[in-house]
Image (spheres, grey):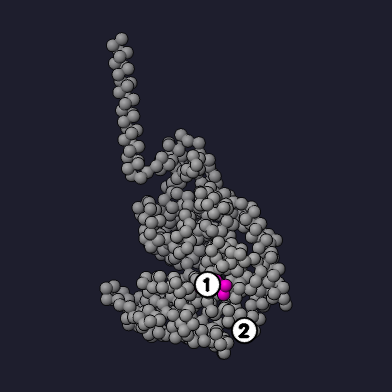
Amino acid sequence: MNKKRRLLVKIIFAMLCLAAVTIIATWDIRSRGMEETDFMYARFGKNRISVFETDGQYYLFLPSFLTEEDIILSSEAKKHDIRILKSENISSVFITTRSRNLDSVLADKDYKESGKIVVYDSQGHKDTSTGLEFLKGRGNYSWNNWDKKPFKIKLQKNTSVLGLGNGKDYAFIANASDATLIRNAICRDIEKDVEIPFAGEGRFIDLYINGDYMGNYYLCPSIEVGKDRVNITNIDIEQDKVISKINDDALSPYETPTLKGWNIPDGVTDITGGYLVEREFMDRYRLEYGELKNGFITNGNEHFIVVSPQYCSKNEINYISSFFEEAEAEILTGEGLGTRIDIDSFAKRYLVEEVVKNYDGGVSSAYYYKDSDLVDGKLYAGPGWDFDMSLGNYLDWMEYDEEDATGITRLYLAEHSSIYYKELAQNQEFSSRVRSYYWGKVQPYMEYLLDEGIDAYEKELSASAAMDSIRWNQMYQEHGYSTADHKEYENLKSFIRERTDFLNEEWAR
């Protein structure tokens, strides 16, 4: 009997110890902000993919190149019923931040954190493995209004990620407002077809950060000066030699009521180029004025940010702002059109924005560039950027919300539109070039989209879109759609069909 009592005491003591350990462990987990799913993950090689929990269901989202046989589940994950989904056809990006935590980045769009990045193609071949100078948030409306956030990265060295051309800066476009996920890709395809100078490509990828599946993203190079980007004279190469010798505290802005530059020596003897400039609407320009390094306002009240060079000297900012004044006068009067601006690039830029009825067309993220007079010397309309609010996809508060697929916008329907294209669209030579490029390049591509292009996109992304729709299910439900819904692709087709029929008649040959 004594032996049985001693055995019972030992069993009770062991159970109490186990309970105590469990309580302590649970308290420790909560105190560190950790959840049960932090111990639920799968490993392949040195990488980890965390289990995602929603509505009491556990999910594991695998990239295209993995199968269940390729992964090892953690001991905690083995205790649960986990639904495993697998992507197909597209590449995957794994980012690990220095802190192995994304909280600080998500809390502040401008917070930067270093780390490393590994990129695999759809077959599992390692495409890129390098350090990150930083990962940070990007975007404005898309950052502030969607749970699925867009990001920007800067690599430690120039790298051609997934064949997108050498550079350090890349963007992850979330496409959170586009149920099809493909509008940005379609519009970039049109840019390539119509041969807009330095038009960029992109790649659909599955994004993982610190082991967490973030969803389907569109990876593309940022718009910057570089051999494989906007290939113009890079003033910064010489200018950096001057800037590096100046203490940051000694840098002082050079400002007038209409422009902002810096009181620094000229870094180059030829200040005529190149310049990369972004058009921004007035309210955002004013809001971000304190943060922007270079900018100017024209007589037509057009607001521009100089992206490159990074710091404009007094002479440089005066030069480029004066050049824009001359180009603006040429656009608004039509006199000597083509002397300072490259008509073809402006016609192509307008054509793409008009065909897809882009809400941001001529409003924001509209890029222009001017090379040195020794190279060319004209002002070019450069590649586009934001296309998620196009092709019939508009938010309730946008002026386009009640618009159908008909109508010519002249990029002047939105509240903060540029005055340039409204005037250019009335010029006979400009309009003639727009029509010519439409029938020669764009119209055939629109027919291709209707015949097979959209179907091909839907097939390519179906597995990844299904994972994305579960990962961001709550957000999508709030907005009344899902990224894996066939009817959304059919709605897009309907808009393109109606838009193409309208333009065929409007711009009849």
- Please tell me which residue is depicted at 36% across the width and 72% down the height of the picture: 290
Q: Which residues are magenta?
A: 412-416
- Please tell me which residue is depicted at 52% across the width and 68% down the height of the picture: 385
Report crowding for label 2: few under 14, some 14 to 19, many 20 or more residues within 10 A (C-alpha): some
| Front-most of residues 132 and 496 | 496
Query: Nearer the viewer's eye, disc 2 or disc 1?
Result: 1
The residue to which callout 1 is attached is 415
Instruction: Confirm whether residue 156 shows in the render.
Output: yes
The residue to which callout 2 is attached is 427
The amino acid at mark 1 is: Glu
Q: Secondary structure at mark 2?
A: loop
- Please tell me which residue is depicted at 41% across the width and 51% down the height of the picture: 210
Reply above or below: 240 against 180.
Answer: below
| Front-most of residues 85 and 144 | 144
Could you tell me which quadrant the N terminus lies in?
Answer: top left
| Left or right, 380 with reference to 251 | right
Q: In the image, residue 490 lies at what x, y percent? A: 66, 57
Q: In the image, residue 129 lies at what x, y percent? A: 44, 57
